C-alpha cells in the first residue's frame, strides 16, 4: 500500500494521468478502437462470412496449431530433433531426385578443351537415356502431350532456323515478330476475341497468369483507385494465382468449391467480392479434377461489380477450343461470355507446340496495355517490354507457329476427338469399379477419382509399380489421369491395370502402405511450414549435379 500511495502522489504520475485523461487523447483512443473493430470485422468478412463456420473453425485451429509449433520449435531439443528429421527427409528426396552414379562423370566446371562432335553425341545420348518414367509409352499423367516424331522434327527444324532470334529486337528479327503476332491472332480467334481483343505470348501458363494478375492490379489502381488489390478464386484455381499474389503484393481470397460438382461456390464468390477486388478467376478446366467452373455465372458477377474475370484455359488449351467441333458440347467459357476480360491458353500443352509457349489474351487492347512495362528515362535508351522477360527465345515462337500451321484446324479436331474420347472411356471404366468414384463432371482431358474403401494413394503406388505415374491430389484426397496423345493410346492398358490392381485390393493381396500414402498422410498431420520445408528440399535437390 505505501508503494501505491507514493505512486499516486508522484508529480510525474499525476501529469501522466492528466495527459491520459485529456479529451483529445480520448478521441484518438476511440479512433484506434474503431480501427481495431474494423480490422476484426474485415477478418470475419474474409473468413467466417466467406468460408463459413466449419471452414473458419478449421482454419483457426490450423493457425493456432502452427503458432504453437512455431514457438515449440524454438526449444533446443525440439529444434534439434526437427532438423535431424528434416535432414533425413532431404537426403531421401535427394537420393530419389538426384541419385549419384559413380559410373558417370559429374561436370561442375567447364572442360579445359571443348567436346568433339563424337564426345558430344555420346554425352547427349547418355543424358537422354538416364532412367525415367516411360512417357513415350503414355504412362505419365500429363507432362508430355504428344509423341509425334514429325512434330518433334518440325520443332527442331524451326529452332535451328531461328536459334539466334530475339523478339526484343523486332527490327533485327522481323520474321519472329510476325510469327508471334500471327500466333496471338490465331489463338485469340479460337477463343472468340472481338476485333479489339489483344494477346501476348509468354513462356508458359504461370507467366500468363502472373501477367493477368499484374494487369488487373494496374487497371484497378488506375481506373478504380484500388491500392490494396484482391483476387477472388476457388481453392482449385492454379497455384500461379497464389504466386502472383505473393509476387505482386496482392491478396488472394480462396473460396470453397461445391463438394458435388467441384465447381467454384458461387455464393462464396459473391460474398468474397468487395471494394478491393480487381479480379475474379475461374478455370476451364481446372487442374485437380478437370472440371469447368460456371464461367457464365462468374461473368455476371464480374459485370455487376465492375471487376475483371480471368478464365484459366491453360490446361483446357486447344481441347476446350475444339471440343464442340469434335462433337462434345461445352458450356460457354470464352470471350462470348459477357464479363470475361482475360483468358490464358497454353499452346505447349494441347497445341502440341514445343515447351515454352502460352498465350495471354485480353478482351481489349486497352486492357492489354496494363501488362506492358516501359521506362522512357533509362540511360540505356527508351525501354519497353510486353511481359516479364526482356530477351525471349524467338526459336520457340517459330516452333509454336510451325506446329499450329502444320496441324491446322482439321488436325486439332481429330486430336480433340481422340483425347476427350479416351478420357470418357477411362472415366466410364473407373465408375464401373464399385469402390471407386469420379470427382465432378470432367469436361475434356482430366479425370480425377478416389475410393470409398481403400487408400487412394496406396492404389496410386500399386499403379506406379506397373509403370504408371499418376498425379496425386489433396483436400480432398485423390489421383487423376490426364488424357494426352500418348496416354490416350495407352488408355486400354491403363484400364486393365487399374481393374487388376483393384481386384488385388478386394482380394486382400495388398497390405503395405506406399510412399505416396506416407507422404500425404504426413502432410495432413504435421504443420504446413514443415511440409513447406520438405517441398523446398525437393527444389534444392533439383539443382544437385
Image (spheres, rainbow, N blue to C red):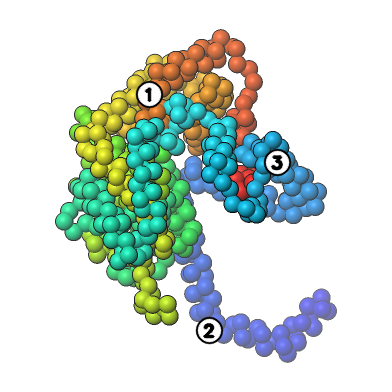
Mark 3 lies on a secondary structure that is: helix
Quarter of the view holding residue 485: top left
State yes or no: discs 1 and 3 in contact (Cβ < 8 Å): no
Tell me where residue 266 appears, x and y as whole percent. Answer: 33, 44
Between the residue at mark 1 and the residue at mark 2, the CA separation in whole angstroms equals 80 Å
Mark 1 lies on a secondary structure that is: helix
Mark 1 vs 2, N-terminal side: 2
Which residue is depicted at the point 52% across and 16% down? 501
Is residue 481 shown above or below 244? above
Instruction: Determine if residue 98 is in view.
Output: yes
State yes or no: discs 1 and 2 in contact (Cβ < 8 Å): no
Decide which of 193, 102 is in the foreground and name it. Answer: 102
Q: Nearer the viewer, mark 1 or mark 2?
A: 1
Residue furthest to the top: 507
Tell me where residue 128 appears, x and y as whole percent. Answer: 53, 37
Mark 2 = which residue?
Answer: 23
Quarter of the view holding residue 441: top left
Q: Is residue 436 left or right of residue 303?
A: right
Tell me where residue 255 appears, x and y as whole percent. Answer: 41, 47
Mark 2 lies on a secondary structure that is: helix
Residue furthest to the right: 2
Mark 1 = which residue?
Answer: 489
Q: Is residue 39 left or right of residue 413?
A: right
Which residue is depicted at the point 34% across and 40% down? 154
Name the image quarter holding the N terminus. bottom right
Tell me where residue 189 appears, x and y as whole percent. Answer: 20, 48
Between the residue at mark 3 and the residue at mark 2, the CA separation in whole angstroms equals 64 Å
Mark 3 = which residue?
Answer: 91
Between the residue at mark 1 and the residue at mark 3, the CA separation in whole angstroms equals 37 Å
Q: Residues within 10 Å of mark 1 (few under 14, many from 20)?
A: some
Amino acid at each position: 500500500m505505501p508503494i501505491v500511495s507514493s505512486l499516486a502522489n508522484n508529480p510525474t504520475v499525476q501529469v501522466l494521468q492528466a495527459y491520459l485523461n485529456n479529451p483529445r487523447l480520448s478521441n484518438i483512443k476511440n479512433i484506434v478502437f474503431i480501427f481495431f473493430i474494423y480490422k476484426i470485422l474485415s477478418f470475419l468478412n474474409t473468413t467466417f462470412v466467406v468460408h463459413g463456420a466449419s471452414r473458419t473453425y478449421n482454419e483457426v485451429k490450423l493457425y493456432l496449431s502452427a503458432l504453437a509449433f512455431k514457438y515449440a520449435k524454438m526449444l533446443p531439443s525440439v529444434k534439434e530433433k526437427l532438423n535431424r528429421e528434416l535432414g533425413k527427409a532431404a537426403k531421401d528426396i535427394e537420393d530419389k531426385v538426384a541419385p549419384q552414379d559413380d559410373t558417370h562423370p559429374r561436370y561442375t566446371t567447364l572442360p579445359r578443351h571443348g567436346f568433339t562432335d563424337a564426345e558430344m553425341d555420346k554425352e547427349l545420348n547418355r543424358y537422354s537415356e538416364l532412367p525415367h518414367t516411360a512417357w513415350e509409352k503414355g504412362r505419365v499423367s500429363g507432362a508430355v502431350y504428344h509423341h509425334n516424331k514429325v512434330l518433334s522434327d518440325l520443332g527442331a527444324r524451326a529452332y535451328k532456323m531461328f536459334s539466334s532470334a530475339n523478339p526484343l529486337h523486332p527490327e533485327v528479327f522481323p520474321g519472329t515478330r510476325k510469327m508471334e503476332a500471327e500466333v496471338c491472332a490465331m489463338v485469340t480467334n479460337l477463343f472468340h476475341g472481338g476485333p479489339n481483343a489483344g494477346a501476348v505470348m509468354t513462356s508458359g501458363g504461370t507467366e500468363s497468369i502472373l501477367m493477368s494478375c499484374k494487369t488487373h492490379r494496374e487497371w484497378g489502381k488506375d481506373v478504380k483507385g484500388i491500392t490494396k488489390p484482391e483476387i477472388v478464386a476457388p481453392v482449385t484455381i492454379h497455384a500461379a494465382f497464389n504466386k502472383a499474389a505473393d509476387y505482386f503484393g496482392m491478396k488472394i481470397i480462396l473460396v470453397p468449391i461445391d463438394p458435388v460438382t467441384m465447381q467454384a461456390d458461387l455464393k462464396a464468390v459473391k460474398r468474397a467480392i468487395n471494394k478491393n477486388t480487381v479480379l475474379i478467376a475461374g478455370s476451364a478446366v481446372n487442374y485437380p479434377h478437370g472440371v469447368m467452373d460456371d464461367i457464365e455465372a462468374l461473368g455476371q458477377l464480374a459485370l455487376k461489380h465492375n471487376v475483371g474475370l480471368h478464365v484459366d484455359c491453360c490446361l483446357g488449351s486447344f481441347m476446350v477450343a475444339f471440343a464442340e467441333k469434335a462433337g462434345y458440347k461445352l458450356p460457354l467459357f470464352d470471350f462470348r461470355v459477357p464479363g470475361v476480360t482475360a483468358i490464358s491458353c497454353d499452346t505447349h500443352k494441347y497445341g502440341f507446340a514445343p515447351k515454352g509457349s502460352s498465350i495471354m489474351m485480353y478482351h481489349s487492347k486497352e486492357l492489354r496495355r496494363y501488362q506492358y512495362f516501359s521506362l522512357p528515362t533509362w540511360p540505356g535508351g527508351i525501354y519497353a517490354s510486353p511481359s516479364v522477360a526482356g530477351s525471349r527465345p524467338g526459336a520457340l515462337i517459330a516452333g509454336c507457329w510451325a506446329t499450329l500451321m502444320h496441324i491446322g484446324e482439321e488436325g486439332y479436331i481429330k486430336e480433340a476427338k481422340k483425347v476427350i474420347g479416351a478420357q470418357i472411356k477411362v472415366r466410364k471404366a473407373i465408375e464401373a469399379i464399385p469402390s471407386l468414384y469420379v470427382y465432378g463432371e470432367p469436361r475434356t482431358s482430366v479425370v480425377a477419382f478416389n475410393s470409398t474403401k481403400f487408400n487412394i494413394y496406396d492404389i496410386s503406388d500399386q499403379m506406379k509399380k506397373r509403370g504408371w505415374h499418376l498425379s496425386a491430389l489433396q483436400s480432398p484426397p485423390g489421383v487423376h489421369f490426364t488424357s494426352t496423345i500418348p496416354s490416350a493410346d495407352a488408355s486400354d492398358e491403363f484400364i486393365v491395370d487399374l481393374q487388376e490392381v483393384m481386384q488385388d485390393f478386394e482380394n486382400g493381396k495388398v497390405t503395405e502402405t506406399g510412399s505416396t500414402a506416407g507422404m500425404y498422410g504426413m502432410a495432413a498431420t504435421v504443420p504446413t511450414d514443415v511440409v513447406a520445408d520438405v517441398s523446398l528440399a525437393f527444389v534444392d535437390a533439383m539443382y544437385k549435379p
